[in-house]
Image: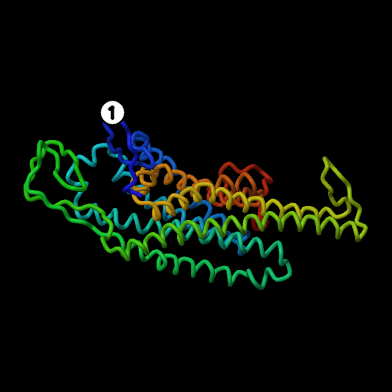
Amino acid sequence: MDNITDITPINNITTPATFRYCRLEQFSNGYRELHGFLSILVCVPGSIANVLNIFILTSREMRSPTNFILTGLALADLMLMLEYVPYSVHVYFDPLNRKRISYFTYQAAVFMFFHALFSQICHFISCCLTLILAIWRYIAITYVQNTNIWCGPKRTMWAIALTYIFCPIICFPIFLNLTVVPKSRRAFENGTLVDDNIKMSFENCTLYNTTIYHLGYSQNVIYNKIMFWVYGVVLKLIPCILLTIFSHQLIKAVIAAKKRRYNLLSNKGIKLEKINGKAIVASNQRFLEKEQQTDRTTRMLLAVLLLFLIPEFPQAILGLVSGILDKFDEECHRPLGDLLDIFALTNSAINFILYCSMSSQFRAAFQKLLHSWRPQGENRKPNEKVLTTVTHV
């Protein structure tokens, strides 16, 4: 595709113009000035929120298979954002860092190598745990009698542990395809480094025999092909397709379960009343509360799945097309990389707000956690009762 040209007549002279998929340089350069500050603004409170998620979801009252998965998800998101903070400071926060020779030291190149691999591993772990969450919830609604057997605490912990073990192994081709590239030039022209791949201006420096380093891709064609299939298909596209399928099946299962409960109650002659167009059980308030809690939990988990898919699917499509079309990655995917990163970081940071807004049990557990951290006797009213009974999300 990189050989495609269009013919444009100018002054009766036919000249070839190079075909381009996208022209996003201006947008990419403009947003790059903001991305560092936005990423810090998201990662710092997002890290605190995920620490709170871990504390709350691992409390004794909140322990359940579903919450074990959410805890593993919070841990992966926390590691992703904690690592992104120094990366953002190194690359974006200082607008002049690319004009300094320290940006191209060997240590800086190794750090970029680590970031490229570690961030993909953490993100893939989050993706796999989100998929496990969808499968577990689908089983809980569709096969109620077998839920404790198929999705019990022990099997859930094994699933989480295996996810953390095998995701780095699956991402290993990324390690093979990346390399630290040394470049050496005898002189600089007017303060600008002369290099085929890097042309950067350095302030107040005249350097000779200087070796610089940057992160590059392997020239091995086989590694590049494997990299395409791992990144574009295995890490991105397949999980998105599976998440979409299970989310759709989960929605169908919720609707079917509501119909079955309604028919069962009607057949048993349990008194039903309609309030605001919704059928409720008038004679069994405890059963009603349990069913409402199940529905709220399912809606919250569906929101987690859908919010994960919104930023993930565009990345999957761009990664797939980048592997198929030459120069698409350079012209379209990379210029949008910073924007896609901020979407993914926001998604990793927003779960705490989602849990608080959609789960009364999570809010109660959060309130209890705050009480436990508060010094005894501080701001406590006489006869004030502290919540001690909280069910899982």
Q: Residue at x 62, y 63 (%)?
A: 136
Front one among 135 and 65: 135
Q: Position of residue 369 (x, y in %)?
A: 57, 51
Front one among 351 and 243: 243
Q: Residue at x 65, y 52 (%)?
A: 361
User: Which picture quadrant has residue 89?
Assistant: top left
Q: Using the rendered image of the protein, determine whether residue 58 is visible from the camera's viewpoint.
A: no
Q: Is residue 319 left or right of residue 185?
A: right
Q: How is the image coloured?
A: rainbow
Front one among 16 and 183: 16
Q: Position of residue 152 (x, y in %)?
A: 63, 70
User: Which picture quadrant has residue 151?
Assistant: bottom right
Q: Using the rendered image of the protein, determine whether residue 59 is visible from the camera's viewpoint.
A: yes
Q: Position of residue 238 (x, y in %)?
A: 51, 60
How many residues crowd mark 1 within 10 Å: few (<14), some (14–19), many (20+)?
few
Q: Which residue is mark 1?
A: 12
User: Which picture quadrant has residue 17?
Assistant: top left
Kind of residue sitting beneath label 1 = Asn
